[in-house]
Amino acid sequence: MHLPFGAMSLLNPLTALGIILALGILGGQIARTSSAVPTLTGYIVTGLIIGPHGLGLISQPLINATDEFVQLALGMALFELGRRIDLRWLRKERALLITAAGGSAVCFTALYLILPLFDVPLETAAILAVLALSCSPAALLEVLRENRAEGQVSERLVAYAGIGNLLALAGYCLVLGISRQDSGLPVESWLLAPGWIFLASAGVGLAAGLIAIHGNRWIGAQHREAQEVLLFALIALTVGLSSALHLLPALALLAFGLSTRNLPRGYAVGSPWVMRYSVVFFAALFVIAGALLDLRQLGDYLPLAILLVVLRSLTQVLSGTLMARANGLSRRRGALMGLALMPMSGTANLALLTSPALLPVSTATVLPLAIATLCLTELLGPPLTQLALKLAGETRPQS
Amino acid sequence: MLEFTNSPPLTLGIELELMIVNRHDYNLTRGSDDLLSLLDRRNHGFDIKPEITQGMIETATGIHDNLGEMYKELCAIRGLLNQCAEKLNLGLAGGGAHPFQRWGEQRIYPKERYRLVSELYGYLAKQFTVFGQHIHIGCPDGDSAVRLTHFLSRYIPHFIALSASSPFYQGADTLFQTSRLSSVNAFPLSGCMPLVQNWAAFNQYFGQMHALGIVASMKDFYWDIRPKPEFGTVEIRICDTPVSLGLAPLLAGYARMLAHHCLATGWDRIEPALYLPYTYNRFQACRFGLDGDIILSGDQGRISLLEDMLTTLDRLTDDARALGLEDCQRQLRERVVKRHSDSEWLRAHYAASGSLSDTVRRQSERWMYDA
């Protein structure tokens, strides 16, 4: 059954959003009845069922109509994740920095070396290994929020994820450059373009951060609503500008959040509201993320996708366990922190892999395997993150 | 029957309850378990333990008869706590109440006694997420402890005004200098010790309460001042935890001078008139701090709290000299004359920044680094 929303003139971003949210809430409510599954999994499954690859109740044009909203939701999550990277802490707490950077290096190396053994081209393996370093900010923050998780595992998990995402984006630019160089493209295409993408993205984020800090100080915390409007405007502006300039919005938003946390007087920018108002945005984001998943891709690529997911999780669990004592955690809690990093961001990664300006040379071989991997991590990741946080004793007990 | 453990008179010890806050929005956070696990790995020998909810931690000094030594120990404890808190990216802060935490979000520490308190008192247990300084003064015997408890009740407004540091509660300015005591008042066994004349009478009272099943131990009395027979002390429980570390030993020094005065003069005017203005004076100090008025017992009329404190400090000159606490007396006097108050410091910062989150950030920097 296909509802003819795509053909109707009534379709605009708001009706699309309304339909997606209204349908998504059904799945969310069903998930809410189970303590084993976070609500966002309900949204994702709903998207999967009603999406173009499922029952087709929402069509691709309907999804496309909500793109700005999705980008904004993703922007809010990345901004908040950036704000959780506390460089002052990382300077003192080298163990965490080593855990995240070392864990990412091991993860990349393992995937880069092992995937080609299963007939995955080297270049494809490099791109997948880089993407595997990322962790879905929206899924992570939403699971933490819903379970009101607090403690060292949660704190270090978010910082680890933030560092992982930064490394993934930097690595992506690097792989992009190497891929283009190998294809014999001119120097401006393989060196200057990726360099420009990386630096300009970070620059846009930094500029937004500086404007936010000075703007917030000028407005004053007494006028919290005005500060919130400014911050929202800057998030939208950063997403829009970096997209228009064919940069990496994800990197710009991370840099934005990071700068407001770490630049002098960054404390002028309060952010709890981001999570407070993000519920609606995230609900739509997860339904659409589910709708974008195509389980048929699993058919051919399931074994490879499982291998990738297992290797990724193993290296993260291993790095968490080995570095647990240095992080002030028990080995068990260190392992749980690694396990909780399972969700990968389908929306953000697919945006990368389908943007013409950011295309590596051999996208055609990457995309199906990436989608298959994302199907697994989007579906299994959030429940595993929730389970890990529960086992670590950091979620709020049910009253 | 409670045995009173005799202890060297006028020795001192203090307990401090501290806030554990996160470093992104400076709200209270569930950090006591992680902090204690990390502390357990170090062979420190200090008394650091959990409190009723997981955003709190309590520390206590050893027994001292010298304020300088007590301050040194407090600095050493703070240094250790800071090291561990920094590793965990946690902040520690003084102050009587967290300005914007939501009591419903607090989690009871998983310990049998706290679980029982939570079961019995329901939401009051979580609302008890407030932070105080307790001062223990050594007493030679139970009778002296009873006398000293009654004697100190007259000076409770002084301790309240000197330590007041909880003007904000649940995100709002309460207009009180200390809002913390409102949380304590809600407990049915709060208030003050009944008018018993000596340790035998106190024991009789305790025996009756115990037989009725109202209390199981002295811990069940949430009085402002209470004898602590197992330590051989009188415990003043009325003070907010100061915003800066330096004030904590000064408050202990004040208690010591008063106790010296009581024991040296053989004070024993234990009479009902003593407690007639008690709750009124207590309210005045909580609400207005040094600007409050108090009523003196008997027919001595009304006096400003500030004036009463200055008079009292003058009257304690001989005691200060006898105990070597002249510097403590001078610092307290200066604080009163200049109307220095942690509550006003917090309000001033909030007025300047407009953000309670930023106010707690400053509060935390002040506690941890004297900034």
Image (tube, coloured by chain):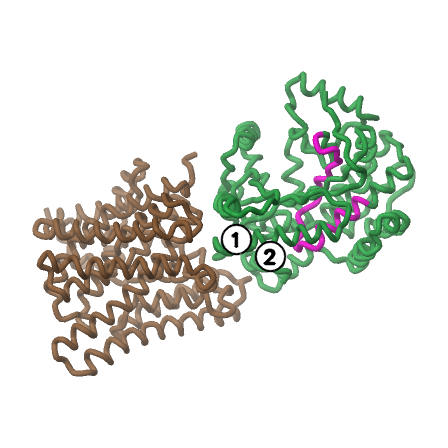
Chain colours: A brown, B green
* Residue B224 vertical position relative to residue A356 in the rendered view, above or below: above
Q: How crowded is mark 1: few (under 14 residues within 10 Å), some or many (20 or more)?
A: many
Label 2: few (<14), some (14–19) or many (≥20) C-alpha neighbours in 10 Å: many
* Residue B341, quarter of the rendered image: bottom right
Does residue B191 show up magenta in the picture? Answer: no
Badge 1 vs badge 2, beta-carbon distance below 8 Å: yes
Residue nearest the viewer, comparing B352 with B73: B73
Q: How far apart are marks 1 and 2 (CA)?
A: 10 Å
Residue stretch in magenta? B230-256
Task: Name the amino acid, label 2.
Answer: Met
Position above or below: B151 against A357: above
The amino acid type of the residue labelled 1 equals: Ala
Is A222 left, or right, of A53 in this rendering? right
Q: Is mark 2 on a helix, strand or loop?
A: helix
Q: Sequence-wise, which precedes: disc 1 or disc 2? A: 1
Residue tagged 1: B85
Q: Looking at this view, name the residue that lies furthest to the front.
A: B43
Residue ranking furthest to the top: B211
Q: Is residue B26 left or right of residue B62?
A: left
Q: Which residue is drawn at 55% across and 62% down?
A: A222
Q: Quadrant of the C terminus of chain B?
A: bottom right
Residue closest to the eye, A271 or B38: B38
State the residue position of label 2. B368
Q: Which mark is residue A277?
A: none
Element type at mark 1: helix
Horizontal and vertical percent position of residue B115: 52, 31
